[in-house]
Amino acid sequence: MRTASSMTIGSLAESTQTRVETVRWYEKVGLLPPPARSSGNYRLYGPEHLRRLSFIRRGRALGFTVEQIRDLLALADDRDRSCGEVDTIARAHLADVERKLADLTRLASELREVIGQCGCGSVADCRIIEALSPLGEPA
């Protein structure tokens, strides 16, 4: 990860494996503060941008929403606050992840059952096609 005191948007994007358009979007929605500008009006990013963008990327990789990340960044900016609110956000996200995992587990089970009923005959008799069709009618 590059840590130069001043870098271009391309360098910042490359350092965090983020698309340039995404960096601009994070600026537009207020997750990244506006960078300084060079005499040629190029964006110049500092170490604080790199840290913040890395935080955003990691949060997104963990599935936090943009709003949750916005809240987490606001809390991170106030170092003297209790981390109780951070814990609340993380626990709510964990509950959502666990709910999705349960849904995916049920889906996988249902798919295994349907696939297990496949006789590998003709499509006209295909149990998978039948299960996907509304009311079991042919597609």
Image: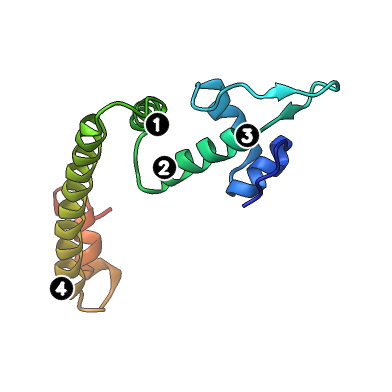
Nearer to us in this view, 89 or 130:
89
Q: Name the residue at 50% across, 21% down.
A: 30
Question: Earlier along the polypeptide chain: callout 1 or callout 2?
Answer: 2
Element marked by disc 2: helix
Q: Which residue in the protein does label 2 denote?
A: 60
Q: Which residue in the protein does label 1 denote?
A: 66
Question: Earlier along the polypeptide chain: callout 4 or callout 2?
Answer: 2
Element marked by disc 3: helix
Q: Residues within 10 Å of mark 4 (few under 14, many from 20)?
A: few
Q: Name the residue at 63% across, 34% down.
A: 21
Compared with 17, 37 (above or below) is above
Q: Position of residue 128 (x, y in %)?
A: 23, 64
| Color scheme of the displayed model | rainbow
Q: CA distance from mark 1 to mark 2?
A: 8 Å
Question: Earlier along the polypeptide chain: callout 1 or callout 4?
Answer: 1
Q: Amino acid at mark 2?
A: Arg
Residue 24 visible in the displayed image: yes
Contact check, label 3 and label 2, Cβ < 8 Å: no
